[in-house]
Amino acid sequence: MRARVPASSANLGPGFDTLALALDRYVVVDVEPASRLIVRSVGEGEGLADDSSHLAARVAIDVAGTDRLAISVRSDIPIARGLGSSAALAVAAAAAAGAEDPLSVATAMDGHPDNAAASMVGGFVAAALVKGGVHVVRLPLDVSLAFVVIVPDVQLSTARARQALPTEVTRESAAFNLSHMALLLAGMADCRLLIPEAAEDRLHQDYRSPLFPAAPKLLAAMVAGGALASCWSGAGPSLLGICRGVDAPGVRAAGEQALASAGLSGQVLLLHADMDGLILDRDGSAGLYEDEQ
């Protein structure tokens, strides 16, 4: 069975561990019976761990209850960059291995549901653990929005990014994030309401900035270049600019110039929301490799 799953950008500023957006970069996983374990990877992460330690292998073996599998992974989602590569891979591998609930499998692997939820259902989502399960709600999303992502050639693991966070926050910080998340939800539903301040946050972004000191200037450069708002993408170091589609090329150019001015290598992507989420292809007829990788 073949499964295609999109990348995701989580948090979106104030929506820490709650909000996520599916984006049109993809991982495709094939899982088939075999006489022994075979793992192949192409694209992002190619050859890093083509054995039983590969995340796709661990997920698929756990779901199938056997390691007699041929597993093929093809991905254009940058790894350890805050674009939900692990969550997307876990959803795809679980689905391709026949899991009844790929989202629960991926959430257990990833430790939190936001990225996996966006990759599973597509669009703009809120996700929470409710009574031991994952509850996902699709949120309104203005279809005129586009998304520019600065992806520096710097890896930052989620575990390391979480270690930078405080164990306690003040009531004022909690209230700040709740109020700004309300502004963000309104602006994502209707871009005419989106203001730069809607993506401000006091729970994680400032604490993670020492891990990627160029972040504040790069975020400001995207807004100066026409983005409606900008924020860290997940745990970073990738940075997300939320913009009107017509302004997106200018925001991308501003991001490229800012990255170069900071003396950093990397890429700046112009992406759109993926509204499909997980797509399963049981017989290989759906053309899930066609031109999207």
Image: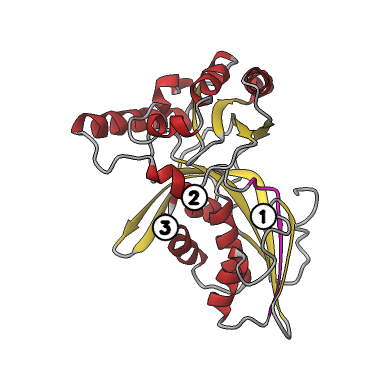
Q: CA distance from mark 2 to mark 1?
A: 14 Å
User: For residue 287, what is the image quadrant?
Assistant: bottom right
| Marks 1 and 3, the one that precedes in the sequence | 1
Q: Residue 179 placed where, x, y %? A: 29, 29
Above-or-below relation of 209 to 23: above
Above-or-below relation of 281 to 18: below
Q: Mark 3, mark 2: which one is toward the viewer?
A: 3
Q: Which mark is residue 65?
A: none
Instruction: Name the residue located 67 percent from the left edge and 50 percent from the top edge.
Output: 26
Classed neighbour count for the residue bearing mark 1: other residues with Cα under 10 Å, few (<14), some (14–19), many (≥20): many
Amino acid of disc 3: Gly
Residue stretch in magenta: 69-78
Q: Residue 245 placed where, x, y %? A: 63, 26
Residue at label 3? 111
Instruction: Name the residue located 29 percent from the left edge and 63 percent from the top edge.
Output: 131
Element carrying mark 3: loop
> Which secondary structure class fits the magenta region best?
strand
The answer to whether residue 123 is visible is yes
Quarter of the image that includes the N terminus: bottom right
Q: CA distance from mark 1 to mark 3?
A: 20 Å
Residue 235 part of the magenta segment: no
